[in-house]
Image (cartoon, rainbow, N blue to C red):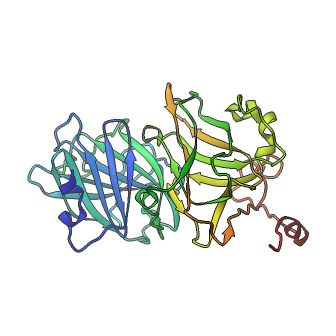
């Protein structure tokens, strides 16, 4: 894998800044590197290498095919790289985009059980059949087929990918390269994780688990970074997670801390669901390092003694018997920093009364207003 993965083996003039793993199941993986140039790899598992067709799609809205901008690439028996610019109008085979060609293959090969294609595309092609690569989070659909397209036909004859597809939300522009886990090796740490939680076969599940603040820190310490730990087998299920600070007045039986679907334990954890310490969702960096002058306070006289980990599982396929131990790890710095880190949340609360969108409207705006009196109460001068 190393030879074909290493970008310098494919193109010495281009350097990759970021990478991500796009996973379909236990056997087949997509490896994806991000700059203005892209590389797409897939591991062969049980099929001839030549019978691989790689598909990468930029979706305008929802992770579905309608209106999607599609690049289809493959390497033929002669080692020649082919790439097609396509567009999906609906639930039908995507057509070749004959307005302009905007996906360009650079090189590719099949080797040691991997198929790799390097390509480029403008961020905004001004083509009505393309989707701009925007700032923020982009929705990607990735897939592969088992048969190379038939170039003797005008439509290219690409076969259906069947269940060999996946969807991920990934930032492709202005991507802040996060630090590596090795940077924090040797530091003290603590974790809040779902422990072997059996995810229900429901389309959407919110799971809440209460944790006691770590007791090993007798004096106040500063966490300098946190790392989201998503089980590799459950990347398709974990949509977001939140770590909430419980009100200092909240008390629990430490031998029987609440642990269940959030609706079932809300009466016990309602004093814990206002102040968030960490919020992460798909597309976000797994590791976030705090500003060097501030740290998140833990231990000692810090008044927060309990936390709630809220996990949101998105399970549209209603998968059964999925066990998850995802969560978050805090890294403790070697010394206190100048400031305690705090979090400010603002906007309209997500309740049915405040964010009710009428049916059949193309656009609906909700204005929120925060008075100076509110900020005077909640934000102190020190």
The residue sitting at 48% across, 70% down in the picture is 174
> Could one spot residue 102 in this view of the protein?
no
The residue sitting at 58% across, 28% down in the picture is 200
Is 192 situated above or below 373? Answer: above
Is 55 situated above or below 127? Answer: above
Q: Residue furthest right?
A: 373
The foreground one among 150 and 25 is 25
The foreground one among 101 and 184 is 184
Left or right? Give the position of 42 relative to 328. left
The foreground one among 208 and 104 is 208
Residue 74 image point, x, y percent = 22, 52
Left or right? Give the position of 156 relative to 193. left
Quarter of the C terminus within the rendering: bottom right
Residue 363 image point, x, y percent = 70, 59
How many numbered discs sit on the rendered protein?
0
The foreground one among 247 and 143 is 247
The residue sitting at 61% across, 47% down in the picture is 241
Residue 268, picture quadrant: top right
Residue 217 image point, x, y percent = 64, 51
Left or right? Give the position of 289 relative to 368. left
Q: Residue furthest left?
A: 78
The residue sitting at 37% across, 37% down in the picture is 25
> Could one spot residue 51 in this view of the protein?
yes
Residue 374 image point, x, y percent = 88, 66
Left or right? Give the position of 259 relative to 26. right
Q: Residue furthest front?
A: 218
Is 246 situated above or below 100? Answer: above
């Amino acid at each position: 894998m190393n030879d074909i993965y290493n970008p310098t083996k494919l193109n010495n003039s281009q350097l990759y800044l970021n990478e991500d793993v796009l996973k379909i199941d236990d056997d087949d993986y997509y490896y994806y590197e991000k700059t203005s140039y892209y590389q797409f790899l897939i591991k062969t598992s049980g099929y001839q290498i030549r019978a691989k067709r790689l598909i990468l799609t930029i979706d305008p809205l929802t992770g579905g095919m309608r209106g999607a901008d599609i690049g289809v690439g493959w390497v033929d028996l002669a080692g020649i790289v082919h790439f097609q610019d396509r567009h999906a109008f609906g639930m039908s085979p995507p057509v070749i985009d004959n307005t302009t060609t905007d996906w360009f293959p650079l090189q590719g090969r099949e080797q040691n059980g991997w198929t790799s294609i390097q390509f480029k595309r403008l961020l905004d092609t001004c083509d009505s059949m393309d989707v701009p690569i925007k700032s923020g989070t982009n929705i990607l659909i990735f897939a592969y087929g088992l048969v190379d397209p038939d170039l003797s036909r005008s439509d290219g004859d690409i076969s259906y990918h069947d269940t060999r597809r996946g969807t991920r939300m990934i930032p492709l522009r202005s991507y802040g390269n996060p630090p590596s886990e090795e940077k924090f090796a040797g530091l003290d740490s603590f974790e809040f994780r779902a422990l072997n939680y059996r995810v229900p076969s429901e389309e959407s599940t919110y799971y809440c688990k209460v944790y006691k603040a770590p007791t090993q820190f007798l004096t106040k310490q500063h966490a300098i970074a946190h790392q989201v730990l998503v089980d590799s087998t459950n990347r398709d299920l974990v949509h977001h997670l939140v770590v909430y600070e419980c009100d200092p007045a909240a008390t629990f039986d430490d031998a029987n801390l609440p642990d269940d679907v959030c609706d079932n334990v809300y009466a016990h954890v309602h004093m814990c669901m206002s102040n968030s310490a960490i919020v992460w969702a798909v597309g976000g960096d797994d590791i976030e390092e705090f500003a060097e002058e501030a740290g998140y306070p833990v231990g000692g006289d810090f008044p927060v003694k309990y936390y709630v980990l809220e996990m949101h599982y998105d399970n549209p396929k209603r998968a059964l018997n999925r066990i998850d131990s995802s969560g978050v790890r805090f890294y403790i710095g070697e010394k206190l920093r100048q400031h305690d880190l705090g979090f400010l949340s603002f906007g309209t609360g997500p309740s049915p009364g405040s964010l009710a969108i009428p049916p059949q409207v193309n656009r609906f705006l909700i204005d929120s207003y925060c008075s100076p009196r509110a900020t005077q109460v909640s934000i102190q001068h020190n």
